[in-house]
Image (spheres, rainbow, N blue to C red):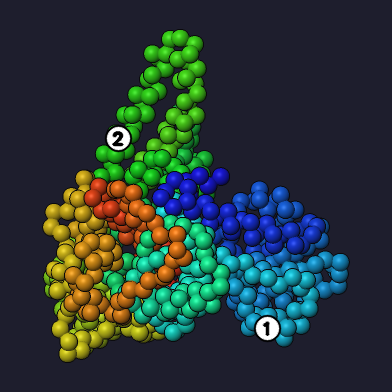
Amino acid sequence: MAAHLSYGRVNLNILREAARKELREFLDKCAGSKAIVWDEYLTGPFGLIAQYSLLKEHEVEKMFTLKSGRLPSADVKNIIFFVRPRLELMDIIADNIISEGKAHSSRDYHILFVPRRSMLCERWLKEQGVLASFTNIDEYILDLIPYDGDLLSMEYESAFRECYLENDQTSLYHTAKGLMTLQALYGTIPQIFGKGDCARHVANMMLRMKREFAGTQNQILPVFDTLLLLDRNVDLLTPLATQLTYEGLIDEIYGITNGYVKLPPEKFAQKKQGEASKDLPTEPKKLQLNSAEELYAEIRDKNFNAVGAALSKKAKIISAAFEERHNAKTVGEIKQFVSQLPHMQAARSSLANHTSIAELIKDITTSEAFFDNLTVEQEFMTGVDTDKVNTYIEDCIAQKDPLIKILRLVCMQSVCNNGFKQKVLDFYKREILQTYGYEHMLTLNNLEKAGFLKTQTGSRNNYPTIRKTLKLWMEDANEQNPNDISYVYSGYAPLSIRLTQVLARPGWRSIEEVLKMLPGPHFEERQPLPSGLHKKRQQGENRTTLVFFLGGVTYAEIAALRFLSQMEDSGMEYVIATTKLINGTTWIKSLMDRPESQMP
């Protein structure tokens, strides 16, 4: 079912199967027919663990979205609420149960909290007078969800906001628990490196949890050699920049949610000759994006400028394969051709889809607006005029461009200049508030609190030193046949990935000075292994590192890590984990107050 999860160095299907087993066990606790009432946010992540067919096998007959009022009619014995532990959702559940009243007295109600039970929620349900109505109250620990053969995400959207604005470390606890689950399945990770305050907290919690389970030794041969914990605020710059890989641009422009993207339908309509175009579909085209699709796995991490050539090469291969049918003379040859047909037809339809997506993206990337925006981003990254008001940003505000675009650029300039002079910051704030409305005062305060916008204190700007030492800007980055990770942003090498690359070789000791300039401590911990579990490495065998981004990671950073894994001489393979897959827009939105009213 999810074969692509087992293709990589680490078989992530083991994790998915463990999650499915737990789900089955809970469903079997509720004997008889069932209806599930879903917290809408959970349906996407759950879809990656279990399809409807699995639920059906366990007598799930109906599924509804959680909303107030009476529950839709369903002739079932059990109603199960699958929800996140949030008080506003408890109000809806209480409303559902009270509205049902005595009508279904023979019915059993159950509640499954994802990823943890909450005493506060249970107390709230008790105050509403409905707690006693529940037969089972349980938790379903879904911390890390496998997205692809080398990618895990918690899809915890508020993690960055909680850590840096609200001083709430719940997400760090979930991270530590998720890593303990991972170690229970894949063996103890002997070496832990980290950078940042949140990384330090997670490592401390993991070590404490390990001490608490001291009696139960993990007898699994370790799959991972190293864990690297990285705080997102160590590198605030990378997600603000526009990603330039194929997958990154799909996410920037259309948004990828739980492995799916919704696209404008016109490009995908199969128009037959002589047919009127008025019957074009109006529903967005929904496509799943992961490495199970051969072509996507091949082009997803390429710089967008190299995608066209890759698609035309693929088109030639596919049409040559179809031409083979003319050469098939004997029955055996015809039989062989027919057996390959389904694969060839799937490849042709995949090619058609990606050609359409590439055309949609090209319309945007070749526009003047895109080019102007990118030029300004690259000027900031190379340190050009970062200390004064930028005329391009000023013009964008005057034209009332989308607020998120403005915020991304202003934050980027601030990060590349280690803050603004007071009068520059005041100017930007005044312009934004007067143009977009004073309700955005809260958002600007949040961005200051999280370190995106700040005034320069006496200290000098460290960014140029960091840029030079870590070679964050590479002139003439080769986009077609890359030889460095900087291709993912056409010249800028993501700071987070440079740190990962240097850690592997020659090690962080070589960049002590730069590490001190970046926020938070850096550290190394070792977890002792039981005797007999030390890995005997074969000649030329790669080491495996799990890189965990606390606060989110972009698709361009993932592409850069995959590039490092594939380099001949790197000797290292990377598996990526994160609290959330993000891009600059979703990240800034998570820090906005009342974001829904701010989209143009």
The one of 295 and 512 positioned closer to us in this rendering: 512
Quadrant into which the N terminus falls: top right
The one of 10 and 592 positioned closer to us in this rendering: 10
* Front label number (1 vs 2): 1
Quarter where residue 464 is shown: bottom left
369, above or below 267, in the image: below
The image shows residue 567 at horizontal and vertical percentages of 26, 49
Compute the Cα span from label 1 to label 2: 59 Å
Left or right, residue 381 beside residue 89: left
Q: Residue type at mark 1: give it.
A: Trp
Task: For mark 2, give the secondary structure.
Answer: helix
Task: For mark 1, give the secondary structure.
Answer: helix
Q: Residue at x 48, y 61 (%)?
A: 187
Quarter where residue 60 is shown: bottom right
Few, some or many residues within 10 Å of mark 1 (<14, 14–19, 20+): some
Q: Tell me, yes or no, if residue 443 can be seen here.
A: no
Which circle marks residue 312 in the picture? Answer: 2
Residue at the spot of label 1: 124
The one of 254 and 319 positioned closer to us in this rendering: 319
The image shows residue 319 at horizontal and vertical percentages of 36, 26
Extreme-top residue of the structure: 330
Q: Residue at x 68, y 57 (%)?
A: 24
Q: Residue type at mark 2: give it.
A: Ser
Left or right, residue 584 beside residue 481: right
281, above or below 132, in the image: above
Q: Residue at x 50, y 23 (%)?
A: 339
Q: Residue at x 20, y 89 (%)?
A: 457
